[in-house]
Image (cartoon, rainbow, N blue to C red):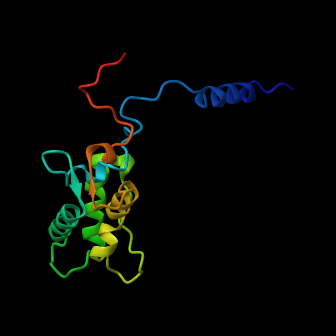
Amino acid sequence: MKRPWLTVLLALTAAACGGGAPKPGGAPEWHPPSELLDKYADKTGIVTRAAIEAGLRADFGAADKNHDGCLNEEEARAVNEARWKAAASTTSPLIDFLHNGCIDFDEFAAEPLSVFEQLDRNGDGRLTPDELHPGHKASSQSAP
């Protein structure tokens, strides 16, 4: 006895698994991790470790709604959601790595400071636009 329903089911399954172009708005646009630091750049595009630390302290203070020096689950969720909306591909969620029910400033600042340290290869405590965006060509340059 033939099973036409099985053939139809297999055909539909194969069609559903087919590739095709990604749907607009499906996958988030890719952003380099260095974008985490862009908002701390001065008007010349230079980012200093001091500027990042000051900016991160201000960001942490704004996220710490009850001003206890600790982000609770609700505060961390709000930060994670805002980060995801801003730049999904560069986002690493805030995680309570110490498992103490609190995300302190060190945990909050770990990712951007780590990116800064990786990019600051000469260890001078500042990132020029070329260090911040390696491989990015200035818009004033023309192609040969």
Percent position of residue 45, x then y = 20, 46
Q: Residue at x 15, y 50 (%)?
A: 42
Between 99 and 104, the one lying in front of the other is: 104
Q: Which quadrant does the N terminus fall into?
A: top right
Q: Residue at x 37, y 38 (%)?
A: 29
Q: Residue at x 39, y 69 (%)?
A: 95
Q: How many marks?
A: 0
| Residue 28 can be seen in this image | yes
Between 34 and 13, the one lying in front of the other is: 34
Q: Is residue 76 left or right of residue 92?
A: left
Residue pushed farthest right?
1
Q: Is residue 78 left or right of residue 92?
A: left
Percent position of residue 33, x then y = 37, 50
Q: Quadrant of residue 140?
A: top left
Between 69 and 2, the one lying in front of the other is: 69
Residue pushed farthest top?
144
Q: Quadrant of residue 3?
A: top right
Percent position of residue 87, x then y = 31, 47
